[in-house]
Image (cartoon, rainbow, N blue to C red):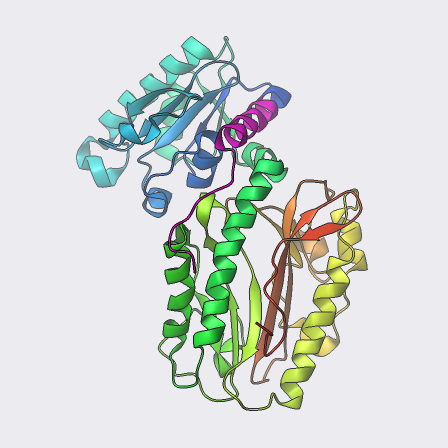
């Protein structure tokens, strides 16, 4: 494992492309600008990271992106130095926090002050257009902007579309994140032994990611034995037994801030996998490969669902929440459901070249002992896909 991380990404090119994607969406919707709080959206627009997990639940930093004009970053406290050298950021100001956590009984006063500052920016740089796209905002702050004459519009859809199509620089950045993740996956496999806890195995993934320049984690989805069924239990102090299934979903944010979302399932120790483990694994593998082979630019999400792998009745109740989802700085648009769910909450659209997506498979039986979870991360191309996740498959992967 390399101890020091060096990137091959052209960061200036990446930043220009991502900012222009935001402004393209603003122009298409006739918005005067965007005010972004969600850390992946702030990262996409200006590429400056600061306490990203903390900022998910504390509105302490945000960025103003006018459709035409200077991008202004509002950062936490004394962190203005973090944006030095970022040529696309015209100015960095100390953010006015408007949360109850930081203001207590003076929250209303600070929200009014904050809203007036934003309204002044819109007046100066919005070109007379007071339609402002905002991605995450609490009701008090929204009402304060409206009192200042700002027309608050939805910034979430705008940013999902802005992030959806990656250029070559983003793909290089994502490949570097995946490389760090897969170094961690290999480390987990080599260290995995019966008698370890789930937490001890999972720790190898994150230690490796951090050592290689990775950033943070979105979940702790690693389980073993009967804790794999049903899925969506986070790792614990359960001691892994010989012959147990060990299944995981990485969901980590690696170098460059990009997500590596890969799932694998193994058998612990030297015990021969059971016939049932082989059956579940082969079904998951067939599911995965069938759906991967459908992926290509121009295919609609509805058609993808209609042509997707048809689960046997015994596996339907344990199906995953989706068969495909987008991935970039986090899990993102698009999202494709199983046919059983399409009428209730599926939606249409189409694959486009430059999208990066994850194709999912989860196979288990209600009342069964274990589940198998597999997932591959790919780049959509005009003729199909490029496989980005390269960790070997198999109950006993060949490293």
- In front here: 278 or 140? 278
At 81% across and 58% down in the image, what residue appears? 307
At 78% across and 42% down in the image, what residue appears? 382
- Compared across the picture, whether 1 is left or right of 356 comes to left
**Count of numbered badges drawn on the protein:** 0
Residue 3 lies within the magenta run: yes
Q: Which residues are magenta?
A: 1-26
**The N terminus sits in image quarter:** bottom left
At 52% across and 17% down in the image, what residue appears? 32
**The C terminus sits in image quarter:** bottom right
Residue at the left extreme? 105
- Compared across the picture, whether 204 is left or right of 304 comes to left
Residue 331 spot, x, y in % from top left = 54, 49
Residue 288 spot, x, y in % from top left = 70, 65
Question: Quick check: 346 above or below 364?
Answer: above
Residue 304 spot, x, y in % from top left = 77, 53
Q: Quadrant of residue 393?
A: bottom right
- Compared across the picture, whether 118 is left or right of 262 comes to left
At 54% across and 28% down in the image, what residue appears? 13
Residue 17 lies within the magenta run: yes
Question: Quick check: 290 above or below 119?
Answer: below
């Amino acid at each position: 494992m390399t101890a020091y991380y060096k990137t091959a990404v052209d960061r200036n090119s990446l930043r220009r492309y991502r900012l222009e994607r935001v402004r393209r969406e603003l122009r298409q919707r006739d918005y005067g600008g965007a005010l972004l709080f969600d850390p992946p959206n702030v990262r996409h627009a200006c590429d400056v990271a600061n306490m990203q997990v903390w900022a998910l639940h504390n509105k302490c930093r945000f960025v103003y992106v006018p459709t035409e004009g200077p991008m202004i970053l509002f950062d936490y406290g004394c962190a203005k130095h973090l944006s030095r050298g970022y040529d696309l950021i015209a100015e960095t100001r100390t953010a006015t926090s408007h949360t109850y956590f930081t203001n207590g009984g003076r929250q209303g006063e600070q929200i009014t002050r904050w809203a007036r500052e934003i309204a002044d920016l819109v007046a100066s740089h919005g070109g007379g257009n007071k339609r402002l796209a905002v991605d995450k905002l609490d009701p008090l702050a929204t009402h304060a902007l409206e009192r200042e004459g700002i027309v608050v519009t939805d910034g979430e859809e705008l940013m999902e579309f802005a992030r959806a199509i990656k250029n070559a620089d983003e793909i290089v950045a994502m490949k570097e994140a995946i490389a760090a993740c897969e170094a961690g996956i290999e480390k987990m496999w080599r260290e995995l032994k019966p008698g370890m806890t789930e937490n001890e195995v999972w720790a190898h993934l994150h230690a490796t990611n951090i050592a290689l320049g990775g950033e943070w984690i979105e979940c702790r989805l690693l389980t073993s034995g009967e804790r794999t069924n049903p899925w969506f239990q986070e790792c614990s102090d359960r001691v892994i037994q010989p012959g147990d299934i060990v299944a995981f979903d990485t969901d980590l944010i690696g170098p460059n801030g990009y997500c590596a979302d890969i799932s694998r399932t193994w058998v612990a120790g030297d015990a021969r996998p059971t016939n049932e483990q082989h059956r579940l694994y082969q079904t998951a593998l067939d599911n995965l490969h069938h759906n991967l082979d459908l992926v290509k630019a121009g295919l609609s999400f509805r058609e993808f669902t209609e042509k997707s792998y048809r689960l046997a009745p015994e596996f339907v109740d344990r199906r995953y929440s989706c068969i495909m989802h987008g991935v970039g700085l986090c899990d993102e648009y698009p999202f494709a459901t199983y046919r059983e769910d399409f009428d209730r909450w599926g939606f249409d659209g189409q694959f486009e070249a430059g999208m990066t997506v994850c194709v999912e498979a989860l196979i288990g039986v209600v009342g069964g002992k274990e589940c198998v979870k597999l997932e591959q991360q790919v780049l959509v191309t005009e003729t199909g896909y490029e496989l980005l996740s390269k960790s070997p498959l198999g109950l006993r992967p060949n490293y």
